[in-house]
Structure formats: C-alpha cells, structure tokens
Amino acid sequence: MSKRNILFVVGLLLVGGLLFWMIASALDASVYMVGVDEVLAQEEHYANKDFKVVGYVVPKSIRVTSDGRVRFGLTKGGAVLEVDYGGQRPDTFADCAEVIVGGRLLPGQRFAAETLLAKCPSKYDTLPADCDQAPPGREER
C-alpha cells in the first residue's frame, strides 16, 4: 500500500470517528420536555435527569424569597409541582402563565429550575379552569 493510500485511510478514520463522536454527544445532550402530570406519575424515571417541564403557574402561588429566588406551583393535568428558580424572571411570568422550566426533579415533588421561559400569552388561548384571572396580555375567557 502506498503512503498516499495510508494517509487517506487514516484521514477517513479520523473524520468518521469525529462524526460518530458528534452524533453520540448530541444524542446524549438531548433534553426531555414533559407535562407536570407525566413527571409526577413517573417520578422514579425522571429522578436525577435534566429535562424540561411545561405547565401553568398556579394562581397566587408565586413567592419571592429574601435572597431573590422565586418559588411557585406549576400545574398541568391536575398535578402540582413546586418549582424553585433563582434566575431572571421574564416580564410575562405571572399567575396562570404557561411556562417551561428546565432543571432537575428533587424528592418531595419539588423541581430545581435552572431556566424559566414564559410563553408569550395569546388572547386566543383558553385559560386553565382554575385560573380566575388572565396574565398580562391575555384576555380572560
């Protein structure tokens, strides 16, 4: 085998290995997004995993601690998850707002959130049944 062919095979193996590593890393870094009801129905499955939870902020549950952290209830499908978040809160974060939090599930139906995204309210979306007021920018139905 000539030196040129050997270099070609080595280069091909390096590119193939790099491509395999990139695909494996991307699959490992994937994050689940599930509803509150699914999380609490399968707590053992979601324990010690990074994932995202989607739900609605429970009315009158938002509490800001002395150190600036926010704690609130997140509900979907009748289940309620207590969320603890210490970052910047979006302007659309309010009672009954639909939010997505990313982080880890803790024992006792608590969620340590590292990210918080509040969905931009739409006047065409219907509010959850237990919401007695609409978040800013959304009409009550």
Image: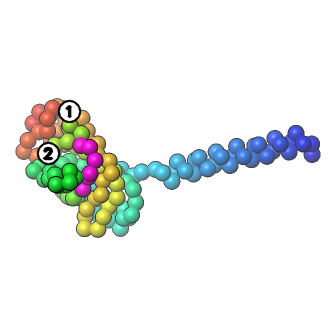
Please identify, in this view, whether the residue under mark 2 or under mark 1 is nearer the observer: 2
Q: Residue at x 14, y 35 (%)?
A: 136
Pinpoint residue 36: horizontal percent, then vertical percent: 26, 55
Pinpoint residue 9: horizontal percent, then vertical percent: 81, 45
**Taking the image as drawn, is residue 35 in sight?**
no
Q: Which residue bears the numbered disc 2?
A: 95
Q: Residue at x 30, y 64 (%)?
A: 106
Q: Residue at x 58, y 47 (%)?
A: 23
**Taking the image as drawn, is residue 124 in sight?**
yes
Q: Is residue 16 left or right of residue 85?
A: right
Dot 1, crowdedness within 10 Å: few (<14), some or many (≥20)?
Answer: few
Pinpoint residue 39: horizontal percent, then vertical percent: 30, 59
Q: Which residue bears the numbered disc 1?
A: 122
Asked where in the image residue 133 lies, by quadrant, the reply is top left
Q: In what quadrant of the picture does the N terminus appear?
A: top right
Pinpoint residue 131: horizontal percent, then vertical percent: 10, 46
Asked where in the image residue 141 lies, by quadrant, the reply is top left
